[in-house]
Amino acid sequence: MRRVFLIALFCAVFICSSVIAQTSILYEPEVQTEAKAGLEALYDLRFEEAESHFQKITQRYADHPIGPFLEALTLWWTILLDLTDTSNDKEFFAAMGEVIDRSEARLEIDARDFDAMFFKGIALGFRGRLRSNRRDWIRAAADGKRAMDYVLAVAAADSTNDDFVLGRGLYRYYAALIPERYPFIRPITMFLPPGDREGGLAELRRTATEGYYMQTEAIYFLLQINYLYEGNFQECVRLVRWLREKYPGNAFFHALEGRIYAHWYQWQAAETVFTEVLELYTAQEVGYTPAMAEQALYFLARARILSGDERAALANLLSLEALTARLDEDAYFKVMGRLYQGIAYDLLGERENAIARYESVLAMKRWGSSHSSARRYLRNPYPAVE
C-alpha cells in the first residue's frame, strides 16, 4: 500500500540551491534537548512524557509550525498501532494542515525560510503516508510530490546536516529502484534527476548512524527497504534488534520483529516473538492493540500449521475471527485468517468446513492471492498441487 506513495515521491520536481540554510529552530539548544528527549519517549510509547517535553517547545514558540507538528506525533503513533482504527484521522489531518498553513504564512514573507520549508515538507510527507495507508492514492501522490520539492531543497541548503540528507537518500534510492520495478513510468524519469541506489542507501546509513533527530526514522526506512526490496534478512534482524533494544516498550517494533522472522520462514523465532506479543496484549500493556493481537494470532496459526498442530492453529484462527468481527471492512488479517481456517480444516480432514471457509473468502475483499488460493483449494484439498 506504500508503493503508489513512493512512486509519487519519486516523481517530485527537484528544486534546489536557491534555499539558504538559515539559523533554524532545530539548532536551538533548548529545542534540541527537549525535542530529542521527547522523541526518545515517543518511540518507546511513553506518550505523556513525550508531550511534556514537546509542550516546553510549543509554549516558547507559539506561532511556529513546530508546535502543531510535535503535538500530532502522539496521534501519529496511535494511528500506526492500529491502522484499522480511523477515529484519529481527522484530528491528525487537521494538525498537518495547521503546520502547512503556518509554514506557508512564513514563506509569503520569505520564500527561502528554512524552517517553513522543512516543516511544510515533513507535514506533507506525513499526510501523504496516512493517505497512502487509507488507499487515497491521488491525494497521497499529490502530497508526495509537494513534500519532495521541499525535502530535497532542504538537503541542498545544508548538506552538512546528517538529518537533512534522509529525504534526499530516499529520493535517490527510489529514483533508481522504481523505474526497474515499474517500467510504465520510465518516460517520466527522462525529465527528473537520476537516481543512485547505492548513493541513496549511503545517505540513509549516514542518518541512521549520525542523525540527531532522524536517526530512528532512518533505521526504520532502511529496515523497510531491506525487507521489501533488498531481501537482506541479516540486515533486517540487525536493524530491528536495534529498535527493540532501544525502545523495548514499542509494540509496533515488537510485532515487526516477528513479521521479519515469518517473512524468512524462521517460524520458531516468529512463534516466540508473537507469543510474547499476545501475552502483552492480554495483559493490556500500552500499545498492544487488537491490531497487534491479530498479527500475533495469524502468524502463530501459520507456525502451528507448519509444525503439524492444526487444532492449536484453528484455535488461534477462531480467536482471530472473533477479534476481527469488530471491523466493518474485510481487512487483511480477517480475510487471510478465514483462508487459513479452510487450510486447517482440510488438514484435519473436515472437508465440508474447509469448503465453507474457501467459499466465504471469495465473497470477501481480495488481498494478494487470497482468491486464487481459495479457488485452488476448492478444486483440490490443501495442500493442492496442480
Image: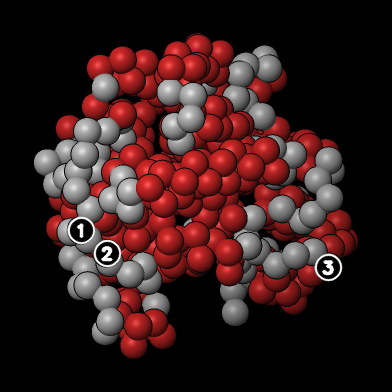
Check disc 1 and report the residue beneath it: 18
| Mark 1 and mark 2 residues within 8 Å of each other at the beta carbon | yes
> Which comes sooner in the sequence, label 3 or label 2?
2
In the image, residue 270 lies at what x, y percent? Answer: 48, 36
In the image, residue 4 lies at what x, y percent? Answer: 49, 67
Left-right relation of 347 to 51: right
| Mark 1 and mark 3 residues within 8 Å of each other at the beta carbon | no
- Name the quadrant of the N terminus: bottom right
Q: Amino acid at mark 2?
A: Ile
Mark 2 residue element? loop
Residue 169 sits above or below residue 75 on the image: below
Residue 330's image quarter?
A: bottom right
221 or 294: nearer the eye? 221
Check disc 2 and report the residue beneath it: 15
Check disc 3 and report the residue beneath it: 363
Q: Amino acid at mark 1?
A: Ser
Label 1 neighbour load within 10 Å: few <14, some 14-19, many 20+: few
In the image, residue 135 lies at what x, y percent? Answer: 63, 61
Instruction: Tell me the tag on residue 192.
Output: none
Spatial separation of the CA atoms under disc 1 and disc 2:
8 Å
Q: Which residue is pictured at 61% across the width and 19% down the height?
A: 286
> Which comes sooner in the sequence, label 1 or label 3?
1
Q: Amino acid at mark 3?
A: Ala
